[in-house]
Image (spheres, grey):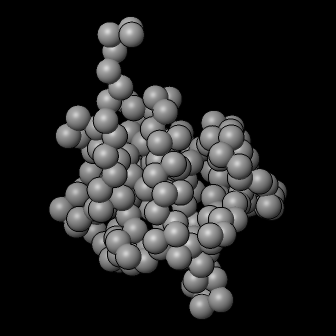
Amino acid sequence: MNGMIEAVTNFLNATIEQLPRIVEIYNQAIPGKMATADLKPITVESRIDWFEAHDPDHRPLWLIEEKGEVVGWISLSDFYGRPAYDQTVEISIYIDRSCQKLGLGQKALHFVESQLSRLKIETVLAFIFDINQASQRLFEKNGYGTWGHLPKIAHMEDRVIGLNILGKTYRS
């Protein structure tokens, strides 16, 4: 034993009181122009409808917590908003910049996989900019395949980048 104890990671349903922290973590990703198509910081008020579109039994929004601190979040959102796609979700994972590259993305994906049967979800899609190699590797390592590529669709002020659609089908 090396004397190190791995931190316990908890996944909790988000509440409206935690929306400011969710927005704070999201806004950290904007300047890097690798994880979101927002170009300017968003406000808590602008995310209330988005928050309310989530519910723990259908389209959850989970907090990632370590040592009592919220260090990230996971969102499962509707894909395309039509009834035939009800078993398909878009996943978003955002980790506080001070906690990136510590394996939290991997833990988050494992947690999500453990919840899919309960949520009656069969297909998970991840929309990842083609320049975001770290996120692509994470999903590919977990069995996601590239199901589509939309070239040069995101105008990120200093460059135009493409979007990859990664997906994985889960059947119980």
Left or right of 66? Residue 105 is: right
In the rendered image, which quarter contains the C terminus?
A: bottom right
Residue 76 at x, y = what percent? 49, 66
Residue toward you, 22 or 87: 87
Q: Nearer the viewer, residue 83 or 28?
A: 83
Q: Position of residue 25 (x, y in %)?
A: 36, 46
Q: Position of residue 155 (x, y in %)?
A: 67, 55
* Quadrant assignment, res 12: bottom left
Q: Residue at point 23% right, 40% down?
A: 69
User: In which image quadrant can residue 89 be found?
Assistant: bottom right
Residue appearing at x 34%, y 15% in the figure: 4
Q: Is residue 101 left or right of residue 23?
A: right
**Residue at point 22%, 67% (across, down):** 16
- Tell me if residue 145 can be seen: yes
- Give the vertical position of 144 relative to 75 (above or below): above
Q: Is residue 121 above or below residue 139?
A: below
